[in-house]
Amino acid sequence: MHRSPPANLAGRRTAHGSLVTDSPAATRAVGRALGAAADPGAVLALIGPLGAGKTQLAKGVADGLGVTSVVNSPTFILMNEHAGRLRLFHIDAYRLAEPDEAAAAGLFDERQAFGVSVIEWAERLADELPDERLEIVIEPDATRHDRRTLRWTAMGVGHARLADDAFSDGSRLR
C-alpha cells in the first residue's frame, strides 16, 4: 500500500490526500482504519465505477466498528443498519434516479448523528449529501486488476481529523 505524505490537518476545514491499495484486503484495511477512528456523525461518501471496491471499503469500515453481522451492498433495499461500537448506516444510492429521492426514501435521519454513514454511489446524491463528510473517490487501475487509487477530500474539521487519524499512521492500514 502506498500513500501520500500525511499533512497536519488540525483545525483545517478541507483536506486532501490519496493512497494506493493493491488488493481487496488492502482496501478493506483502509476501511478498517476509518471505522476504528470514526466518531459519531461521520459520513463517508464513496464514489467510483461498478467494481471499484466501494463495498470492500464499506466492509472494512464495518470491521473497524466491530460489526459482526454480514455487510453486503444494500443495492435493492437502499440502506442496511448494523450494530457495532457505533451503528453503521450502509447506504447504496445506485438505484436512485434523482438526488431528492434520498430524502423521500428516508435515507437520512437524526439517528445517523450517533453512528457512521457509509454511502456507496454518493455522487448520485449531489446536494443531498451533508456538507461535512469524507469523500473517497476509488479509481481502479486499468492495467493492474487489484490496484486502486483512493483520493479523499475531508470537508469539515471532524472529517479532516478522521482522515488524519486513519491515514497518518501507516500501521493502521494493515
Image: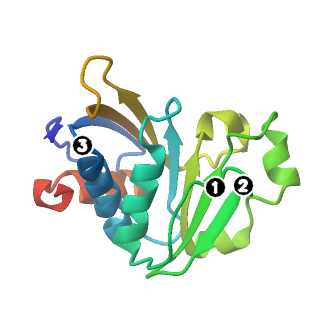
* Dot 2 alpha-carbon crowd within 10 angstroms: few under 14, some 14 to 19, many 20 or more: many
Taking the image as shown, residue 110 lies to the left or right of residue 46, namely right
Mark seen at residue 91: 1
Please state the horizontal and vertical placement of residue 165, each as a whole percent of the image: 26, 60
> Residue under circle 2?
78
Which is in the foreground here, disc 1 or disc 3? Answer: 3
How much space separates mark 1 and mark 3, taking CA atoms? 23 Å
| First in residue order: circle 1 vs circle 3 | 3
Residue type indicated by callout 3: Ser
How much space separates mark 3 and mark 2, taking CA atoms? 27 Å
Which residue is pictured at 43% across the width and 82% down the height? 85
Taking the image as shown, residue 16 lies to the left or right of residue 132, namely left
Q: Secondary structure at mark 3?
A: loop
Mark seen at residue 119: none
Residue type indicated by callout 2: Leu
> Residue under circle 3?
23
Contact (Cβ within 8 Å) of mark 2 with mark 1:
yes
Please state the horizontal and vertical placement of residue 154, each as a whole percent of the image: 42, 44
In the rendered image, the quadrant that contains the C terminus is: bottom left
Residue 10 appears in the figure:
no
Between 41 and 80, the residue placed more toward the observer is: 80
Which residue is pictured at 33% across the width and 17% down the height? 142
How much space separates mark 2 and mark 1, taking CA atoms? 6 Å
Please state the horizontal and vertical placement of residue 172, each as a whole percent of the image: 18, 61
Q: How is the image coloured?
A: rainbow
Residue 50 appears in the figure:
yes
